[in-house]
């Protein structure tokens, strides 16, 4: 997707995703998360857009 950032699993089952990149790719990520076609169950997606921090060089799982 051309994004950088991370996905982090929490003990309560939530997943925190931080992604930076062009707006169209970010919208594609949100659409994928909401599609019902993810490897895990996604009940709710909450989005919060802010300025890119620029401290990520790849997309990793934490």
Image: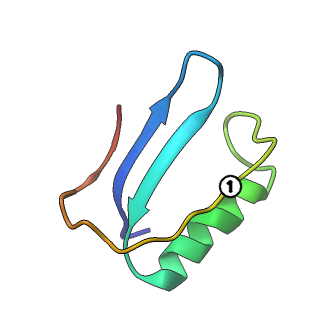
| Quarter-of-image position of residue 41 | top right
* 28, above or below 46, in the image: below
Instruction: Give coordinates of residue 28: x percent, y percent.
Output: 60, 72
The spot of residue 20 in percent (x, y) is 37, 67
User: In terms of depth relative to the viewer, which is nearer, 49 or 31?
Assistant: 49
Q: What percent of the width, then of the height, locates residue 11?
A: 56, 15
Q: Residue at x 65, y 23 (%)?
A: 13
Q: Position of residue 22 (x, y in %)?
A: 41, 82
Residue 34 sits in which quadrant? bottom right
- Indicate left or right for 44 with 10 as reference: right
Identify the residue under disc 1: 46
Residue 31, picture quadrant: bottom right
Give the residue at x 53% y 24%. 10
Q: In percent of the image, x 35 and y 31: which residue is there?
A: 62
Residue at left 49%, top 48%? Answer: 17
> How many numbered tags mark residues here?
1
**Nearest the camera: 37 or 24?**
24
Q: Nearer the viewer, residue 42 or 45?
A: 45
């Amino acid at each position: 997707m051309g994004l950088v950032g991370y996905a982090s699993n929490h003990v309560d089952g939530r997943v925190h995703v931080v992604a930076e990149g062009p707006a169209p790719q970010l919208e594609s990520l949100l659409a994928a998360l909401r599609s019902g076609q993810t490897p895990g169950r996604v009940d709710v997606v909450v989005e919060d857009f802010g300025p890119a921090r620029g401290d990520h060089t790849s997309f990793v799982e934490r």
